[in-house]
Image (tube, rainbow, N blue to C red):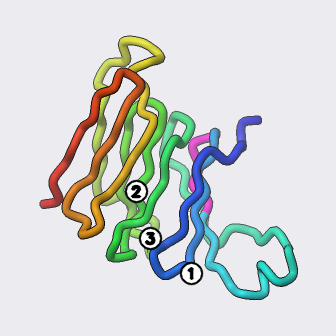
Amino acid sequence: NNKAVKSLNFSGNGELLVAGCSDGSLKLWQLEPRIFREGIEPNPTKILKEHLGEIKSVLFSPCGKYLISADTYGEILIWLINSGEIIESLNITQELESEKSRLLSLAVSKEGNYLVAGDGKGTITIWRNK
């Protein structure tokens, strides 16, 4: 399924939900209590599409202003949530040596000072916030 959901995350305040999909898209929902009560599947509030590979990890920044997404090719995008604009692009793999070198995981520190990515070879890459 080219639209399979690969990663999910809630914003810190619980008002937004993001789904990272195998087609490289990110789908965001503005949550309302009625959605859960009625059990309906809401249409996304916003769809972001820039990644070429399937999404492996999505998360919100601790401050709640940014969305961070990573795909299997090692491309990490940092988005302004309100506008959907990409403000930074990072890449952990300039040249894929094998399937094992693909990005698998992403994390941000509680204070938002560090972004960490891990790949299938066991490599962890750390960026410090400017």
Q: What residue type is labelled 2?
A: Ile
Residue at (77% x, 71% y) in the render? 42
The quadrant holding residue 110 is bottom left
- Whether residue 55 sits left or right of residue 103 in the image: it is right
**Residue under pointer 1:** 15
**Numbered badge on residue 68:** 2
Residue 76 pos. (x, y %): 37, 45
Locate the N terminus and report the quarter of the image it occupies. Answer: top right
Locate the C terminus and report the quarter of the image it occupies. Answer: bottom left
The quadrant holding residue 86 is bottom left
Residue 113 pos. (x, y %): 19, 62
Pointer 1 and pointer 3: residues touching (CB < 8 Å)? Answer: no
Magenta region, residue range = 23-27
- Whether residue 116 sits left or right of residue 45 in the image: it is left
Residue 6 pos. (x, y %): 62, 44
Q: What residue type is labelled 1?
A: Glu
Which circle, 1 or 3, is nearer the viewer? 1
- Whether residue 99 sits left or right of residue 35 in the image: it is left
- Whether residue 79 sits left or right of residue 47 in the image: it is left
